Structures are given as C-alpha cells and as structure tokens.
Amino acid sequence: MRTERLFKLGQYLRRQRQAVTAEQLAAQFGVSTRTIYRDIQLLSDAGVSIKGEAGVGYIISRDAYLPPIMLNDNEIEAVALGLAMARQATDAQFARSATSAYEKVCATLPKYMLEQVAQISTYTTTPHTPPKDHTHFSDLRESIKQKQIIEIHYCDENGMASQRKLQPIALIFASPVWMLVGWCQLRSDFRHFRLDRIKQLHCTEVQFTTTNDTSLAAYLQQETACQAV
C-alpha cells in the first residue's frame, strides 16, 4: 500500500506547476499530514529532487527523475525495442539520448534478460527501406515544447516549393518517415509535413498560445472524424 502511494505521490507532484501543501496532499490521498511528511522524506531519500518544506509546500524539480519502477519481462522488452527503434528513426542528437537510455536499462538487467533484449532489439538494425532525413527532429521537438512559431521551406511530393509559418503541434512516426503536424497560418488549418521534405527550418522565438481550435486534442478529434466518414 505504501509503495503504491509513494509512486502515486511522486507522479502527482511531478504534474504540478506550483507547490502543494502537505494538507492538500493529505486530502488528495486520504491520509494524515504526518504520513505525507514521512512519504516526502522517503521520496527524498530515494533520490527524488523535491523542493519545499513543511508549511510552505512541495514540488518536484522539472529535471528530476522518479524513483525506479518495477517492470515485467514483456514491459522491459517493449521499452528496449522502443529505444532501439528511436536510435534509428530520429536524428543524431535524439539517437544519442536513446542510446544512453538503452545502455542504462541494459546495465540493470540479469543475463537472461540481456539475451532476450538483444534478440528483439536486433530486429531494428536492418531496415527494409533506406533511412530518411530527420535532421530537424530535435529542433522541432524543442519548438513544440516551447510553443514557438517556426518557418519552413517545404517541397511537396510533386516538387512544388512553398514557405509556411506554423504553430508546431506534434511529431508523428509514419514508418519510415516522421510527419510534423502544425497549424498553418496561411491555410488556417492543420497540415502535415514530412520531415525529409523540409528543406530549411527557422525556429523563431515568437511564442504562440494554443486555443481550442488549434490544439493537439482538436487535431486528433478532426482526424477521428475524418476516419469515421
């Protein structure tokens, strides 16, 4: 019971943008404030970077890590396979992060699991199609996270060139290519752009505000409606 509560407490704190008091946490989890103080201390002892103090409130640092979680064999294989695929299907910067994460996962595994992970991970090493150009992957990820407008020079499948100013919304992997979903200011609608057809990318420092009509949720709703027709 305590282990489950600690995990949920860590998850809850990580989602908060402002400090949460022990009283608020106690009400959220149905325990006493004394229990919350003990749980906070246990999380801190486990390496979770919790900022705050009694009477003020608590929050987890944005760059902090949650305590280790238990995964079964199939879940470990799924994580390893995903990381192995990410090493090949993204740009060099993100591939380095995926490789580092993959090595950290493997460093904790028993021998029998290393063999299983190696067997499934090798499936990603010989793609049937040549790798696509994903040069702009990390820059686009950052623009999406920072909600910054981008400008692109794009060449479509017919060789027609165009310039677009976009609110980047999401990156979608449609094997073997990555697609950028963006709100196009020219068309006032969502548009898809293949990363390997983006010839130039300029990441501005101009912030945009997501509305109900330009959000990822709106895009997904629109796609669902189109598929249902």
Image (tube, helix red, strand yellow):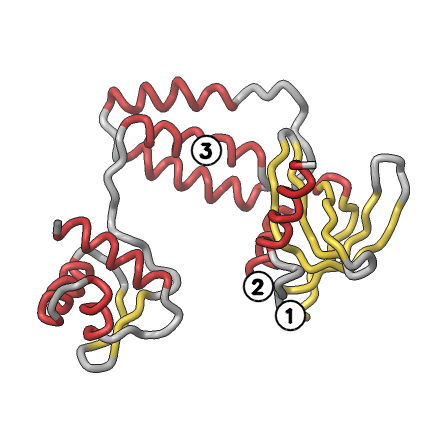
Measure the alpha-carbon separation of dots 3 and 1. Answer: 32 Å
Helix, strand or loop under label 1: strand
Measure the alpha-carbon separation of dots 1 and 2. Answer: 8 Å
Residue, x 36% and y 24% (percent of image)? 117
In the rendered image, the vertical position of residue 62 relative to residue 85, given as above or below: below
Helix, strand or loop under label 2: helix
Instruction: Name the quadrant of the C terminus.
Output: top right
Q: Quadrant of residue 81?
A: top left
Q: In which quarter of the image is residue 64?
A: bottom left
Q: Name the residue under label 2.
A: 146
Residue, x 25% and y 54% (percent of image)? 8
Q: How crowded is mark 3: few (under 14 residues within 10 Å), some or many (20 or more)?
A: some
How many marks can you see?
3
Q: How crowded is mark 2: few (under 14 residues within 10 Å), some or many (20 or more)?
A: some
Foreground of the two, 4 or 66: 4
Viewed as shown, does residue 49 lie left or right of 140?
A: left
Viewed as shown, does residue 41 lie left or right of 176?
A: left
Viewed as shown, does residue 163 lie left or right of 13?
A: right
Q: Which of marks 1 and 2 is nearer the N terminus?
A: 2
Helix, strand or loop under label 3: helix
Viewed as shown, does residue 13 lie left or right of 33?
A: right
Do the residues under discs 1 and 2 have CB atoms within 8 angstroms?
yes
Q: Which of marks 3 and 1 is nearer the N terminus?
A: 3
| Mark 3 residue type | Gly
Residue 69 visible: yes
Q: Quadrant of residue 130?
A: top right
Q: Mark 3 points at which residue?
A: 82
| Mark 2 residue type | Gln
Q: Which of marks 3 and 2 is nearer the N terminus?
A: 3
Looking at the picture, how far across and down is residue 133, in whole percent?
Answer: 69, 37
Q: Name the residue under label 1.
A: 207
